[in-house]
Structures are given as C-alpha cells and as structure tokens.
Amino acid sequence: MKAAEKFVLICCLFQGVLCREFSISLPESIEALRGLCVLIPCSFDFKEQYDEELQNSPRGVWYKGDSWAKHKVFSSKTTEDNKIDGKIIGDLYRKNCTTIFYNISESDSGEYYFRIVSGNLKYIYPSSLYLNVRASPISPSITLYKEDQGEVEDQNEVVEGTSVSLICSARSPCPFNPPIFTWNFPPEERKQEQNHNTRFRSSQLNFKATRLHHGLNFTCTATYQLQNMTKSAQSSFRLHVLYAPRNMSVSVSPSASVPLGSSVSLSCSSDANPAVLNYAWYRENREQIGTGKHLTISKIASTHRGLYYCRAQNQLGDQKSSVYLDVQCEYSSVFKYYINLESSFQT
Ligand SMILES: *[C@@H]1O[C@H](CO)[C@@H](O)[C@H](O)[C@H]1NC(C)=O
Ligand SMILES: *[C@@H]1O[C@H](CO)[C@@H](O)[C@H](O)[C@H]1NC(C)=O
Ligand SMILES: *[C@@H]1O[C@H](CO)[C@@H](O)[C@H](O)[C@H]1NC(C)=O
Ligand SMILES: *[C@@H]1O[C@H](CO)[C@@H](O)[C@H](O)[C@H]1NC(C)=O
Ligand SMILES: *[C@@H]1O[C@H](CO)[C@@H](O)[C@H](O)[C@H]1NC(C)=O
C-alpha cells in the first residue's frame, strides 16, 4: 500500500474528525413561481477547526451574482436592507441553512451563493444554486403505472382489466402553497394526494382499464394560488387499451330470409384493439366453412337453412356471434300469395 492510499484510508476511518472540508449541499437549480414563496433546501459544513466559532450566533447570508461579482440580497441578521424578503428556517447551529424566500419576482432569477458568518468563521461557498422564477407554472407530468409492472416506460398501452394508476406530478416550490390537482374525470375514480418529496406534489388516479377508457384524454390540472389570483398548468395523457373482440354482430345481405337459388352474403363485424386478426365461419355442426370478414353463399339450397357462426379473434382473445339463415322454398312464396289474396278478399 502506498503512503497516499494509507493516508486516504486513515482519513476515511476518522472522517468527520480529521477530514472535514468546506462543503455545501444545495440543489443545482430550483424552478419557482412569481408571487409564491420558494423553499431552498441547504446544508453546509466546514473545517473542524471552526467548530467553536459556530456557537457565536451564526448568520446566514445569500448573495446573488456570479463568481466575479456578487451582491448581498439577504441576511438573517438584518431585515431593513434585505432585497428579498425571507427567512432561514434551518437551524444554523446544526449546519442547516434551509431558506425560504417569500413573494419572489422574476427579477430574482439568478445564481445564489451562501455565506456563513460566525465569529472567525466567514466563508462564502463557491457552489451556487440557480433560481429560475417563472411567470407561469411548468406543466405537470403524467406517468402510467400498471399493476405488478411498475412504471411503464415510453408507452401508454394497457390490457383491458389491468389495474392502473395515472400519477400527475407537479412542482411545489412553496410548501405553504402546494398546487391543487383536478382531473377531467368524475370522482368515482378514486384519487389520492401524496407528497413524494418537498419540491413536488402529486395526485393519483386509480382505476381498472376497460375498453371504454380507450383513446380517452386524461387531463390533470395543477392550480397554484398566488397572492390575488390563481395560475394553472395542465397535461394530458391518452390511454390506449387493448381488448379482445367485443360487440360483435353478423349482418346478412340482402336479407336473412333467402329464396332458393339466390345468393346471400354474411358479414361479421366487431370492435377489437388491436384489430381482428382473423375471422372464421362455422355451421351448427362446428364444421368450418370459411374465413374472412365476409362469407358468400351462391345458389342457396334448402340444406343451407340454419345457424351460422362467426368467430373473431385477435391477440387477446375471441368472441362469437351467430345469425339464423332461413331459406324460403317456392311453395312458401305461393302460400304467402294465397294469404295475401285471402286478406284482400276480406276487406
Ligand atoms: C433542515 O431544516 C429544515 C427546516 O426545518 C428541515 O425540514 C430539514 O429536514 C433540515 N435538514 C436536515 C438535513 O436536517
Ligand atoms: C409581492 O411582490 C410584488 C412585486 O414585487 C409586490 O407588488 C407585492 O405587493 C408583494 N406582495 C406582498 C404580499 O408582499
Ligand atoms: C386533451 O384535452 C385537453 C383539455 O381538454 C386539450 O387541451 C388537449 O389538446 C387534448 N389533447 C389531445 C391529444 O387531444
Ligand atoms: C394582483 O396584484 C398585483 C399587484 O400586487 C396587480 O398588479 C394585479 O393586477 C392583481 N391581479 C388581479 C387579478 O387582481
Ligand atoms: C356496438 O355496436 C353498435 C353498432 O355498431 C353501436 O351502435 C354500439 O354503440 C356499440 N356498443 C358499444 C358498447 O360499443
């Protein structure tokens, strides 16, 4: 083992005692909304030799600018000359510099640097936070979660019957004024609100996907209450539901009552997603007599009388539908003629 490695090892063993450096933990950037407050999570550390100094009523100061030119915008000690109204809500004695700036405006956008001042401990941390103050909120994001499958990447397809959740997540820069969520769906589809962390809020819509949800546009709106107005942002999500053939029907042209010797065409229709892969036609004896959406029988004979079944199938299943084909024999039309004749005599 080389000397340098040994040193690193020892150093790590005694970390916190021997090796503390000046460091700060800040988000790289924060999206804030004009007129709202913004919470800045912050914690700092310094060389152990300054431990005593921190007991000297520490003061946190925020500077705005860049690495060359910075100006003070906030200090936890004075209130009069603060350019930004705010408060350090973290406990500086415990190296927590978490800060809230109230009623932020667009001109407050920029790089922010933290400085700790306590006795001989006076240090401005070189890592900065970029505060981006917007006039309008950023649109929320909607993610689809499927039962047992977790987050669904890059797609919005779901098989009918699956329990799904749509989670709408929006930024919540100000903990006192989180966004209020609304969905364009009735409340029977259960919804919950939860916090995943301090800077985002979310709302969850849980339901079992049915084909009636296919193609629907789920819209989530996040509304922020500002001083004297509200601002909202929304996102939409189009759900694709895959389902087996449904709502089948068989139609007969020209009619289901066919004269001997004529020809007839049967058509099968169904609603399926993805579209029907194949159609098959059967008689009562289960003999397959054709495939395809249409079945044509030319030269109808009396043996053609009976039930005809159509079966439609896609990747998710199949469904059957039937129609009764009646063959009119010649005598029956003659018989009809007599009935008509009789009734005309009666009148
Ligand atoms: C810092 O203080 C804030 C506000 O009191 C608190 O929410 C947060 O958990 C603290 N952070 C740490 C690292 O203790
Ligand atoms: C918030 O800031 C705006 C613009 O800087 C100002 O006009 C307004 O009076 C402030 N509102 C409050 C409640 O401080
Ligand atoms: C979904 O609905 C929203 C609001 O009703 C609308 O603004 C948006 O254009 C719709 N999206 C699509 C893809 O139809
Ligand atoms: C809200 O207040 C600001 C100043 O604080 C004003 O400029 C704006 O017109 C007000 N908006 C409404 C909708 O009253
Ligand atoms: C079934 O199909 C018929 C005719 O194609 C249509 O009018 C009806 O709305 C469909 N029903 C459903 C539940 O899709």
Image: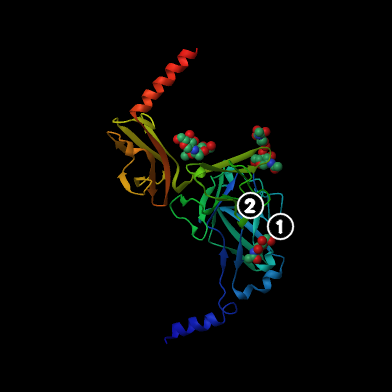
Q: Which amino acid does label 1 sit on?
A: Lys
Q: Which of disc 2 and disc 1 is earlier in sequence?
A: 1
Counting from the top left corner in percent of width and height, residue 45 is at 60, 69
Seen at 38% across and 43% down, the residue is: 310
Residue receiving disc 1: 77
Q: Which of 152 and 261 is in front in this view?
A: 261
Q: Is residue 192 visible?
A: yes
Nearest to the observer: residue 270 or residue 235: 270
- Side of 127 where 86 appears, left or right: right
**Residue at the extreme bottom:** 1
Q: Position of residue 230 (x, y in %)?
A: 64, 39
- The type of residue carrying mark 2 is Gln
Residue at disc 2, CB closer than 8 Å to ligand 3: no
**Whole-percent x, y for residue 223 in the image:** 62, 42
Q: In which quarter of the image is the N terminus?
A: bottom left
Tell me the residue that label 2 is attached to: 192
Residue 197 can be seen in this image: no
Count all numbered tags in the image, as a single digit. 2
Residue drawn at (42%, 51%), measured in percent from left and top?
A: 317
- Please, is residue 7 above or below residue 205 in the view? below
